[in-house]
Amino acid sequence: MESILICLSLSLVGGLLMSRPAKKLGLPAVTAYLIAGLLLGPFCLGKLGIPGLGFLSAEQVSSFNIISQVALGFIAFAIGDEFRLSQLRSMGSRVIVVGIAQAVITTALVDLTLIVLHLLRPDVISLPSAIILGAIAAATAPAATLMVVKQYKADGPLTHLLLMVVAIDDAVGLVLFSASYGVVTAMESGTVSVVKVLIEPVIEILLSLLMGGLAGFLLHCLEQFFHSRSKRRSLSIGFVLLTAGLSMIEFDLGGVHISFSLLLVCMMAGTVFCNVCHTSQEIMERIDHWTAPLNVLFFVLSGAGLDLGVLSKPLVLLVGIVYILARSLGKCAGAYLSCRATGCDRKTTSYLGITLLPQAGVALGMALTAQNLADGAMIRNVVLFSVLVYELIGPALTKRALTAAGEIHPEGKTSARVQDTPKPPVTLS
């Protein structure tokens, strides 16, 4: 127990200390936390084998997954705040069109590129792997994006569209991956399962939205019984924890596998709560202050979980580089074309694609599912390599894009440090 507490405290303190030189270099704090995680991970300090001084193995990092899941729940809940009816009315159908189009275009381009690579070098990558990697390419990591937006207080049309699109990405990516996984399974087994290709992903999305909506409305109903800010904040935190826990439930019903998407459930809970509760803005701000250390731990653990071993595999590097280039082109081209088609302003059209490059948890989850395929190890290693690259450079690129769009202003020299002033003596009359 003591080594767990020491390890977590070192992760938190180490991540915060690493953010100081990162700020001098103009890098987002997210990048600093990820680098701190790499240094504390099993490939650096963990190799020393000293309990408490870093993570000794990938299994030890995985044992802290509950922290990552909870952090993702709060991140998704915060993104739900972007889906206020006032903003949705101003955006119209633009969010849906851009969210779906950029994901589909990315998948199509990565599929085409990797299939061509398969035809040229069938010994490097199989056709099923090419199809699955194309579907995984659609996923975007909401956590890194939201943290950059919060750190620099980005605000504007690009920022609002970005946060909505990364939320929609989870649902679109789920459908694309489920369909591709069904096709690949049919190729390997010779049987097509309509249930797994069409029914299960649709059920997962609908049930996730339903559960999240009910949770958000119930939170609003219970919140009215409390007037203290601290109690309302505690109630909201408890509900996000409850929602995240319920979203992890899985079971089979009549031959259909029932599961929920943590991101969709918590995002929908945040959306409903923020639209029905007139004090939601104040509550969301107080929750944000409470979750700040949790977010630091989330990214440090993410950095510790990055597998540097994939860098020693030449074939993985080759496929990974092709995958990264094709996905980056797909995100940029897909965002550009869909923004042009929906009449977005010039800066949003030019820079949205760059902000959609970060990739992490959702993609890794898909790769974990794909491990059951014949070439599952290759898929997992390529995704691990791409996550390593995207997580380290993605936040910095997002910051540059938002700055170029004029939605991040230069940081001032203000400090939150205030010297304590002695309280005046109390006199009794």
Image (cartoon, grey):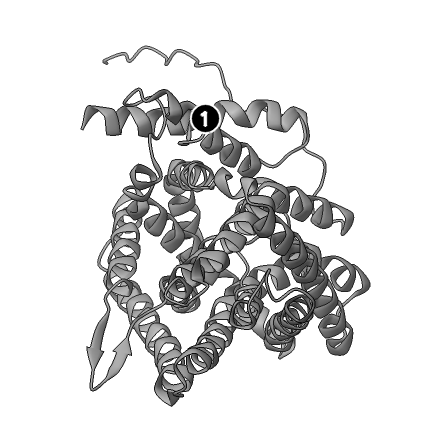
Is the residue 153 above or below the residue 345 in the image? above
Kindly identify the amino acid type of the residue bearing the numbered disc 1: Cys
188 left or right of 227 in image: right
- Residue 80 coordinates in the image, percent (x, y): 46, 62
- Residue 84 coordinates in the image, percent (x, y): 51, 67
Q: Is residue 84 visible?
A: no
- Name the residue at 68% across, 58% down: 328
Q: Is 405 in front, or is 234? A: 405
Q: Is 280 in front, or is 293? A: 293
Indicate the secondary structure of the residue bearing disc 1: loop
26 left or right of 240 in image: right
Could you tell me which quadrant the N terminus lies in? Answer: top left
Residue with the mark numbered 1: 44
- Name the residue at 63% across, 43% down: 393
Q: Is 231 in front, or is 93? A: 93
- For the view shown, which residue lies furthest in the right direction? 346
Could you tell me which quadrant the C terminus lies in? Answer: top left
Is the residue 174 above or below the residue 360 in the image? below
- Residue 110 coordinates in the image, percent (x, y): 64, 67
- Classify mark 1: residues with Cα within 10 Å, few (<14), some (14-19) or many (20+): some
314 left or right of 403 in image: left
- Name the residue at 51% across, 20% down: 417
- Residue 276 coordinates in the image, percent (x, y): 39, 69
Q: Is residue 201 visible?
A: yes
- For the view shown, which residue lies furthest in the front direction? 123
